[in-house]
Image (cartoon, helix red, strand yellow):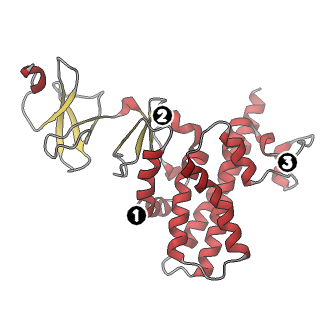
Amino acid sequence: MAVRRKRKKDAAELVLANAIDFLNAGLDILFAPGATARQAKAGVVTIQTAIELMAKYRLIREHGLSVIVRGTPPSGDLLAAARSGSLRTIGYGECLKAIRKAEAFTPIEEELVGRVQQLRNSLVHFAADVDVNELQMDLAWLLIRALGMFAAGQERDQGEMQTHARFLDATNFQRLINFRPYRDEAVDSALDGIDSEEVLRCWECGVDALSVRPSDTYFCHCCGLTAELGMASFASCVLCGEAKGVCYDPLNDTGGVHQGRCLHCETFVGVVTCASCGKARSQLEGRPALACAECVDA
């Protein structure tokens, strides 16, 4: 059993390593300063390959290498066959069908993830003239779903402190999370997500795309931050009034006051907990009151 698990892990990591290479190479091409239509086409095809590999990575990690084999798996070492290039595997559409069994797609996600192959085919076979800016925007939208559902996958519910930086080199990570269409679509992805119980501002990238998932974990649809709910809490800001704008560490305090920062007005404030109702509130300075104003008035 241990050997089988190791082989599954080895196969998944091999596919992921290739996906990372294709993804970063494609982004380098597509987002290069002054990229031409010819370069953009090559970048899209390269990124489409990466997205398909990320989908296969998720399936292999969860079910083993045999799940992506087309037809009856051959006898012998599947990993060796894969390394030699003799293993026939399923296509992107079939990967999506397999992933849907474990994760429901919203109509928008269904459309976007399905457009990957269509976009690639139209560019390779028919498109002569393309708009580089439109291609950059389309691929940014697609990568939000691919990085979350395929590359991160089940890790979104494990609460480990990590981001999409593990899939992207430093330049491409910053390039994506600071690309306005990507940031805007990440917000929509979080708000429309089936698994989003609440959406907050992310303390890592500053985008309103941090989902609270049913697994009691945070997942940012923009930068890919994953963390347990106990790692951070939110309170209303005493200065700008933003509800749940102040982020703080609930496990650390000094004299009953937690140190927090408003993610909206960028002010450092203290956070205290009402002894009566248990709600957290921010304050500028001074000793914490035992009860909030609402409880005192009541």
Residue denoted by label 1? 180
The residue that appears at 46% across and 46% down in the rendered structure is 192
Amino acid beneath label 3: Arg
Quarter of the rendering containing residue 84 = bottom right
How far apart are labels 2 and 1 at the CA level? 27 Å
| Marks 3, 2: nearer the viewer | 3
Would residue 222 be seen by someone viewing this image from the given angle? Answer: no
Q: Quadrant of the N terminus?
A: top right
Residue named by callout 2: 159
Q: Amino acid at mark 2?
A: Gly
Label 1 and label 3: CA atoms lie apart by: 39 Å
Residue that label 3 marks: 70
Mark 3 or mark 2, earlier in chain: 3
Q: Position of residue 165 (x, y in %)?
A: 49, 52
Q: Position of residue 171 (x, y in %)?
A: 47, 64
Three-letter amino acid code at the position of disc 1: Arg
Q: Residue at x 40, y 62 (%)?
A: 178
Quarter of the C terminus within the rendering: top left
Q: Residue at x 53, y 76 (%)?
A: 132
- How many tags in the picture? 3
Q: Secondary structure at mark 1?
A: helix
